[in-house]
Image (spheres, rainbow, N blue to C red):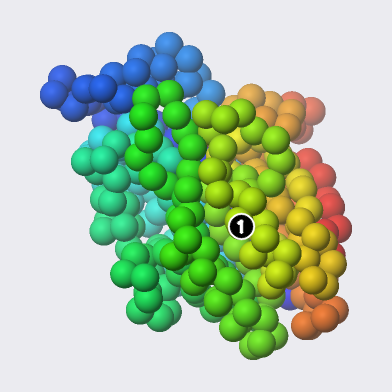
Amino acid sequence: MFTLAHLSDPHLSPMPRPKLVELMGKRAVGYFNWRARRSIHHSPDFLSALVRDMQHRGFDHLAVTGDLVNLGLPDEYGLAHRFLESLGSGENVSMVPGNHDAYVRGTALLHIDLWKDYIAGEDAPRSGNAFPFLRRRGDLAMIGLSTAIPTAPLLATGKLGNPQLAEFERLLRETKKEGRFRVVLIHHPPVGRHSPHEVLTDAAAFREVVAREGAELVLHGHKHKAMLHQIAGPDGNVNVVGVPSASNPGGHSERGGAYNLYRIGGKPGAWACEMESFGFIPAHAGIAKIRSTKLI
Ligand SMILES: [Fe+2]
């Protein structure tokens, strides 16, 4: 039995104080939004309590699906690196970036440099980029994708691009031959209906790859709510699971901060995967199990 943990979108705060010169264009709009609206949905104290609970329960590996920072300020990447170190080493934590981690062009690639221990794959990347990465842990193959691209103000779209999609398909095929439980990490949900300002623009191409090659589990963030969809694969449905923001103290709802544990066992052709979700439950006055779902 392998226990995989999943959390997403911590949007770390308090945000380092931006210099005036850093508040140009998209960051100015984002900073106003953060102060006026977004910051109340992200509590560092709640995030600490959630992480403590997750570490207390224990896991073999942790997947983090992006949006560690908010405005792409240089100081935010250091704060995020310390957060990653508090979760574990690159050996037992893997992460993929979200749109906020590549918020503006000037710092869009800083995460690749500063968080490299958590995104480094086992093979030298063929496309010259860090993504997709492949990390094997136990019977699992984790394939990490990047949808993080800088966009215009008020846009939160993502894109994989054809080179990454081609390599993704090759890795799915290779790791299926190895008989591994394939887990795909991606920030933007590749399925479901979403408003145009926040979609994965090549989600259809992603789904076509999964329809051809299959996968055992797809994990994402971005929407800050609990989600479960399926993509029809060659050997049955592929579960696509989204978690809420890990720092949202919003209580017991689909948007309340939570993390998931996936208990994975079985063997190729007969995998088993049970998902347990943990978040704040008012009746318990603390973090407790919200639900269990048998995925496979
Ligand atoms: Fe987010």
Asked whether residue 256 appears in the rendered view, the answer is no
Q: Residue furthest bottom?
A: 178
Residue 87, percent from left and from top: 46, 55
Q: Amino acid at mark 1?
A: Phe
Q: Quadrant of residue 243?
A: top right
Whether label 1 lies within 8 Å of ligand 1 gets the answer no
162 or 271, nearer to the observer: 162
Residue 224, percent from left and from top: 60, 34
Residue 43, percent from left and from top: 49, 28
32 vs 277, left or right, is: left
Asked whether residue 34 appears in the rendered view, the answer is yes
Q: Residue furthest top?
A: 36
Name which residue lies at 76% across and 56% down. Answer: 231
Q: Say if 58 sits above or below 134 in the image.
A: above
25 vs 147, left or right, is: left
Q: Residues within 10 Å of mark 1 (few under 14, many from 20)?
A: many
Q: Say if 185 sits above or below 267 in the image.
A: above
Residue 61, percent from left and from top: 56, 66
Q: Quadrant of residue 117?
A: bottom left
Residue, disc 1: 206
Q: Say if 119 sits above or below 72 in the image.
A: below
Name which residue lies at 31% across and 57% down. Answer: 112
Name which residue lies at 83% across and 51% down. Answer: 292
